[in-house]
Image: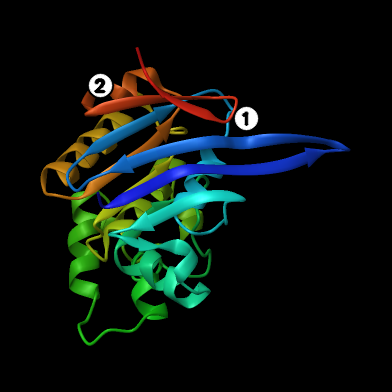
């Protein structure tokens, strides 16, 4: 398995009362697999994704990427993993307002320099998500849907083995959402694993598997 989580949990407190945001979740995803997780707000979906991407450490359980356990990696190694093999599309727009669309797209390569020039690939990805004509624009001139497409292009820049997306179609119109879902399906068919969290049950139509998150626990959808 490319990404595997085994019995991971995360506990918080509301006042003096503890509760599990994620409660004993096990999950695996392989290359080319498209998995959707559905569930209400507050069910633990974003907390789960933050642990799967190494941004948050589980209180118990284990997570491994390509056989390497996260607890064996330092912060720099986890950051490198997110910028090379694991693309994460977080909720919100996640762009720097003083950077152009193109600059925002190539930002991961700027943080982790490589020999090759990322600009040509970034332009190709902007074309693929339908906003190449906006490459030189600042974020203030873009719509919410266009900003989401910037985040998607940026996450795909490193040709990740796994793409994780948190509500990527949440603020998009129906046509744009359908285009993004079709893109994710194509990415999966090209060999990239896709794990997407969504409120929209219709968005699961292109997935290979759909899981349900409820009160911090994960189960297969009946």
Between 211 and 127, the one lying in front of the other is: 211
Which residue is at the far left?
Answer: 190
Q: Quadrant of residue 215?
A: top right
Q: Quadrant of the C terminus?
A: top left
Q: Secondary structure at mark 2?
A: helix
Q: Residue 184: percent from the left, percent from the top?
A: 24, 41
44 left or right of 171?
Answer: right
- Side of 125 where 82 appears, left or right: right
Q: Secondary structure at mark 1?
A: loop
**40 or 24, nearer to the observer:** 24
The disc placed on residue 124 is: none
Residue under label 2? 205
Q: Is residue 204 above or below residue 92?
A: above
Q: Is residue 90 visible?
A: no
Dot 1, crowdedness within 10 Å: few (<14), some or many (≥20)?
Answer: few
* Above or below: residue 150 compared with residue 25: below
The residue identified by callout 1 is: 42
């Amino acid at each position: 398995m490319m990404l595997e989580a085994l019995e991971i949990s995360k506990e918080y407190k509301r006042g003096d009362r503890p509760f599990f945001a994620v409660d004993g979740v096990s999950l695996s995803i392989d290359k080319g697999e498209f998995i959707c997780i559905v569930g209400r707000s507050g069910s633990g979906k974003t907390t789960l994704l933050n642990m799967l991407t190494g941004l948050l450490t589980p209180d118990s359980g284990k997570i491994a990427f390509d056989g390497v356990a996260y607890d064996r990696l330092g912060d720099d190694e986890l950051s490198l993993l997110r910028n090379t093999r694991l693309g994460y599309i977080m909720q919100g727009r996640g762009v720097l307002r003083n950077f152009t669309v193109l600059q925002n797209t190539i930002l991961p390569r700027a943080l982790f320099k490589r020999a090759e020039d990322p600009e040509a690939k970034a332009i190709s990805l902007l074309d693929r998500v339908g906003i190449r004509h906006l490459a030189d624009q600042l974020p203030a001139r873009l719509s919410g849907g266009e900003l989401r497409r910037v985040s998607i292009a940026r996450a795909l820049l490193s040709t990740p083995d796994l793409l994780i997306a948190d509500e990527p179609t949440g603020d998009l119109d129906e046509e744009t959402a359908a285009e993004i879902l079709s893109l994710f399906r194509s990415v999966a068919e090209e060999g990239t694993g896709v794990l997407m969290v969504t409120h929209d049950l219709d968005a699961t139509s292109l997935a290979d598997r759909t899981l349900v998150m409820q009160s911090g626990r994960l189960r297969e959808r009946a």
